[in-house]
Image (spheres, rainbow, N blue to C red):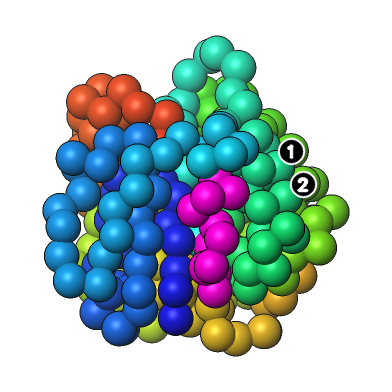
Amino acid sequence: MRIAVFGAGGPTGRELLTQALAAGHEVTAVTRRPQAVAACEGLTVTAADARDAEAVAEVVAGQDAVLSALGVPPGKGPVTLYSTAARHVTAAMERHGAGRLLVVSSSVLDPGWRPSGAFFFNNVLDPYVNRVIARAAHEDMRRMEEVVRASRTDWTIVRPSGLFDHPGPTPYLLAEDSADGVFTARSDLAASMLAQVSEDRFSHRAMGVATTRVRPNVPRMIWREIRKNAGAGRPEERALESSPR
């Protein structure tokens, strides 16, 4: 299957590339920084900005599926990347008849998301990190979701919880709208997205993804994500994605 991955230079994008190539897909990595993506068999690296409608249309043509792992660091400034990219991608997919579309959003966008047994997160971290620090990003994610829902594509909105790195997929939890968990391993997020490329369980629905078998060291995770954010400084490399984005 031919798959285009937007935001391929970020941590989630790189995990998508690794798993998609291992599964035998023909993958196009779309990134503003092609030098950050190592060349390998089965991979085409394309330098393109998701905010450029013409560039997006060129990438989407001929693809069987489009996966978006675009993201921005939390901050006080306005955010438009998610919704702008969504408009360009959906328009291009409608024009060229590309198949599945999966976009990474956040569990925060489900008003009913309150992970079980997570008092400190629900009452301290979530109100401050997600509702204040990452507010602008989440507002644009909401606009992105509206664009995707209104499109004529075969879409799935993917909502992880707080993202962290883990060596490989685990028996992750899936649920409509959001899953009951504070954290999501990037390996599980990527695995769930690639599984949905050829499935229709969550077609035209939002899919929550949570990791329940392993948990990150929270202070270490936050520190690592802050360092990634400070070093990246690029809008397609999400720092505290989904929770912690």
Q: For mark 1, what is the residue?
A: 143
Q: For mark 2, what is the residue?
A: 147
> What is the crowding at mark 1: few (fewer than 14 residues within 10 Å), some, or many (at least 20)?
some
Q: Which residue appears farthest toward the right when viewing the image?
A: 150
Label 1's element?
helix
Task: Kindly report which numbered mark, 2 or 1, lies closer to the viewer in this rendering.
Answer: 2
The picture quadrant where one finds residue 123 is: top right
| Camera-side residue of 214 and 167 | 167
> Is residue 199 rendered to the left or right of residue 211?
right
Label 2's element?
helix
| Camera-side residue of 82 and 126 | 82
Q: Is there a contact, CB below 8 Å, between mark 2 and mark 1? A: yes
What is the spatial separation of the Cα atoms under label 2 and label 1, in whole angstroms? 6 Å
Tell me the residue at 72%/50% (across/down).
91
Instruction: Say if residue 155 shows up in the picture.
Output: no
Q: Amino acid at mark 2?
A: Val
| Camera-side residue of 110 and 26 | 26
Q: Amino acid at mark 1?
A: Arg
Is 152 located above or below residue 136 in the figure?
below
Tell me the residue at 35%/74% (across/down).
26
Instruction: Say if residue 146 shows up in the picture.
Output: yes
Residue 176: numbered disc = none
Q: Is residue 65 magenta?
A: yes
Q: Which residues are magenta?
A: 56-66
> What is the crowding at mark 2: few (fewer than 14 residues within 10 Å), some, or many (at least 20)?
some
Residue 83, percent from left and from top: 67, 37
Residue 204, percent from left and from top: 76, 70
Q: Is residue 149 magenta?
A: no
Tell me the residue at 60%/17% (across/down).
78
Residue 120, percent from left and from top: 48, 43
Q: Which residue appears farthest toward the top when viewing the image?
A: 77
